[in-house]
Amino acid sequence: MAERFLRNCWYVAALDTEVVRMQPMRRTILNEPIVLYRKRDGSPVALEDRCAHRQAPLSKGVVKGDVIECPYHGMRYGPDGKCVLVPSQDTIPPAAVVKSYPVVEKYKWIWIWMGNPAKADPNLIEDFHWRDDPGWQSKGELLPLKANYRLLVENLCDLTHVPFIHPTSLNETMIDRDEEIPVNTFRSGQSVTVERWEFNKPAPSYFRTMAGLSRDDKVDRWLNLIYTPPSFVRLDIGAAPAGNGAKDGDRSAYPTTRNMNAITPETDKTTHYFWANAINYDLEDESLMEIDYRMVHDAFLEDLEIIEAQQENMDARPYARLNMDGDTGGVEAMNVLEEAIVAEQGDLAEVAE
Ligand SMILES: [Fe+2]
């Protein structure tokens, strides 16, 4: 079955560094080919990457001033998608228009609105301020994934795979395998939270490195994961001296790690995976960010490998989903997503008329 996507929402279309002034970039999002470039004032533009005339990709053309010129017959389109020049004739047919998408640059990402443009409120962009907040160091990247985006959301909401997929990358350093740690999963409005606490445990190597703790230091540790639709997962991971009441008190005094995931469907079966980590441990020490980034990068490659193998199997033969207790967060996330998709169908039908 073809994928139905949530459209009235912001997706991350690109890293800020990917979209440059003179070299237009093609990127497929929700199965739609899009061209991204920047105007003279630096603001980003997103247009359908398909000339209204003979469907040539505008991304193979050139940017002139604020307009983009089709490589095939030189038709030029403005940032609003309207054709402003047909070199071979004086008149411009009214149908010479390509779709223009609302775009916003925020948190070092270029965001795109794929639904009803009248509803594209920049205030609806999810909070990822840790990416450019001066109180944090941050580093991330874009990883390509040859699988449906839902598999990645489910992966991030599920902690039970960690000892198996990440035995050395995460398990020995950040997350223990030695016992089953209960998680608390709950839904609040459109967000799903998966929360896990451990009390009075030795500090794992990650926290010894980041916070300068010793092997003898006992800590209370938390991992707090929040999903919001369509496909954002944000984690707050930290440790405080044991017995300081971090669970129910103010944790702002303790440095933490934020793991940020913005997952954008490319096609039904391929995904643009934007992620970044931010830490507010010793800000003077840039090597800490590098250690943190490398650890998560290695772990996420392990995830992508198993997810792509999953997708291949799912494509090969019909299957039934079998859920375990550890899937509760992911299943709830998919419920929220499905409800949101159903709820917006009426609005999108109005736009299409
Ligand atoms: Fe994982």
Image (cartoon, rainbow, N blue to C red):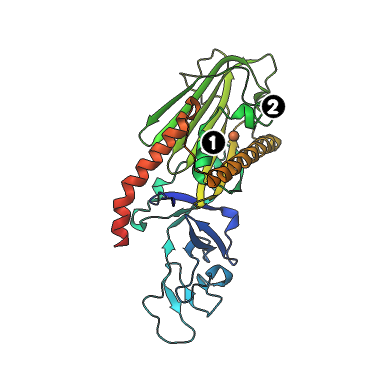
State the residue lying farthest toward the front: 317
- Rendered position, 342 above or below 328: below
Camera-near label (2 vs 1) is: 1
Disc 1 residue: CB within 8 Å of ligand 1: yes
N-terminal-most mark, 2 or 1: 1
Q: Position of residue 80 (x, y in %)?
A: 42, 67
Which residue has dot 1 on it? 155
Q: Quadrant of the C terminus?
A: bottom left
Q: How many marks?
A: 2
Q: Is residue 132 visible?
A: no
At x 46% / y 76%, what residue is drawn? Answer: 53
Q: Amino acid at mark 1?
A: Asn
Q: Nearer the viewer, residue 210 or 160?
A: 160
Task: Evaluate if marks 2 and 1 touch, with contact meaning CB atoms under 8 Å apart.
Answer: no
SS category of the residue bearing label 2:
helix
Q: Position of residue 184 (x, y in %)?
A: 46, 23
- Rendered position, 326 above or below 300: above
At x 43% / y 44%, what residue is drawn? Answer: 230
**Crowd class of label 1 (few under 14; some 14 to 19; many from 20; radius 10 Å):** many
How far apart are labels 2 and 1 at the CA level?
A: 26 Å
Q: Is residue 47 visible?
A: yes
Which residue has dot 2 on it? 209
Q: Position of residue 16 (x, y in %)?
A: 56, 53
State ligand 1's quadrant.
Answer: top right
Q: Amino acid at mark 2?
A: Thr
